[in-house]
Image: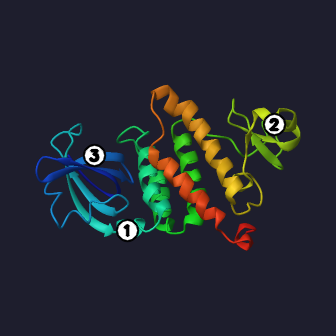
Amino acid sequence: MQWQDEAIIIGVKRHGETSVIAELMTRERGRHLGLVRSGRSRSMQPVLQPGNRVEAVWRARLDEHLGELKLEPLRLRAAKLMETATAVYGVQAMGALLRLLPERDPHPHLFDALDIILDTMDDPADAGELFVRFELAVLNDLGYGLDLTECAATGVRQNLKYVSPKSGRAVCGEAGAPYADRMLALPAFLGEGPKPAADRDSMLAAFRLTQFFLHRHVYEPRGITANDAREGFVQAALKALSARPVDRQAG
């Protein structure tokens, strides 16, 4: 058995004296593990860093085996990802989200989204919005997607202010007002129509929104908790938005 694919490294574990087991997010084969011989060598250590994009060749006698990986660097961005707190925490948190998906289950759109987000993580003020959209995409692929396009009660697409915690569907201001204390806030940048740039308050509401549904549908049923890196990312992103000039917040 053999395949070749583009991949992004999301994790590495030591294996024996000189090798490692690399965890990749591949474009066509989803999250995939493989043994990298001499992965702890000086030449391979810079390549085997989370966030780097590589060309991967996987070989095994049988498809269900761990297999062996040969990796060639395509984009070494790990050093740049160490420059900001949002990037340091973000690459870890997105890796943890991808581990919620079944191994070897293809999600090419998540690969493409991850690749784009990692290239823009050096702008902390924008990283939060991209991360929340990534969380929403993972929820959708797990079968718990939110419908934020129209009001669950009236069908209108304007003035969407809330999200029902029961249905995961948007609710307009008029229909949701009597139940506002039981609703989750829908940030304007996630709704329909013109989308203003996220500010600190709307970003905080977005983080609470995705956290609620991840906890309800994924973490709680599986008896796990969110990766600690997520909270580090959230705090770093909110801090960056607090420092964003007012004219940029206005979009």
Amino acid type, callout 1:
Arg
Q: Quadrant of the C terminus?
A: bottom right
> Which mark is first along the chain, 1 or 3?
3
Q: Judge left or right: residue 41 versus residue 202.
A: left
- The residue under the point 43% across, 56% down is 91
At x 35%, y 58%, the residue is 50
Q: Amino acid at mark 3?
A: Leu
In the rendered view, tell whether residue 4 sits above or below residue 103.
below
At mark 2, the secondary structure is helix
Q: Closest to the observer: 95 or 248?
A: 248
Residue at mark 1? 77
Q: Residues within 10 Å of mark 3 (few under 14, many from 20)?
A: many
Query: Residue sitting at 55 percent across and 34 percent down?
Result: 215
State the separation of the CA atoms marked 2 and 3.
45 Å
Residue tagged 2:
180
Spatial CA distance of label 2 from label 1 is 44 Å
Can residue 131 be seen?
Answer: no
Which comes before the other along the chain, label 2 or label 1? Answer: 1
Residue drawn where x is 49% and y is 69% of the image:
122
The number of discs equals 3
- Where does the image place residue 34, in percent across and percent down from the top left? 23, 48
- Whether the residues at callouts 3 and 1 have beta carbons within 8 Å, the answer is no
Image quarter for residue 167? Answer: top right
Dot 1 lies on which element? loop
Query: Up-down: is 247 above or below 181?
Result: below
CA distance separating discs 3 and 1: 21 Å
In front: mark 2 or mark 3? 2
**The label number, if any, that marks residue 33 in the structure image:** 3
Whether residues under marks 2 and 3 lie with C-beta atoms below 8 angstroms apart, the answer is no
